[in-house]
Image (tube, rainbow, N blue to C red):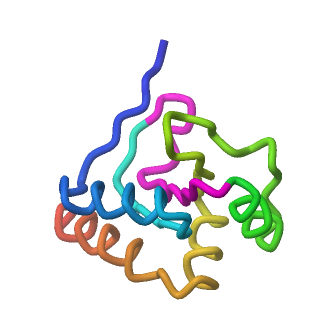
Amino acid sequence: MDCAMAFGIKRQELEQWKERAASGELAFLTHFWHDGRFPEYQTVTKVACSDVEKLVRWGRKHGLKREWIHHRSDFPHFDLLGEKQQVILAAENKSDQLARLVKRIKRKDE
């Protein structure tokens, strides 16, 4: 059984994401990620909100379906991967989250 692993985020970033999501805000968290089911992806963005209907409306705007929401703990969220991740982050003016990780990947490869 493959398990997903998240890395490359600081505890403070995670805590801020949780606080924003719990307060009913749309919270974005992009981090490195490894999941054997999706070996072609190195990053994921989790978009969470405690207000599930707000999350559904936001997702619909980006072509995401309600049934794709992960209902884990107190943080219902969408997982964004690949091209969809890039397109949505750009549309939401959050491209800096992904750019920060891409820079780290490039430095590592040099």
Q: Residue at x 81, y 49 (%)?
A: 66
Q: Is residue 50 visible?
A: yes
Can I make out residue 81 in this image? no
Residue at image coords 18%, 70%: 107
> Would residue 6 appear left or right of 38 to someone viewing this image?
left
Give the camera-side residue of 51 and 2: 51
For the C terminus, the quadrant is bottom left
Which of the two residues, 75 or 108, is positioned nearer the viewer here? 75
Report if residue 13 lies within the magenta region. Answer: no
Query: Magenta region's main secondary structure?
Result: loop
- Does 21 appear above or below 37? below
Specify the segment rendered in magenta: 35-51
State which quadrant residue 84 falls in. Answer: bottom right
Residue 94: percent from the left, percent from the top? 48, 81
On whether residue 45 falls in the magenta region, the answer is yes
Q: In the displayed structure, would residue 89 be above or below residue 78? A: below
In the rendered image, the vertical position of residue 49 relative to residue 69, given as above or below: below
Q: Position of residue 25 (x, y in %)?
A: 53, 69
Q: What count of labels does the image hold? A: 0
Residue at the image point whose x is 64% and y is 85% from the top: 91
Whether residue 78 is situated above or below residue 1 in the rendered picture = below
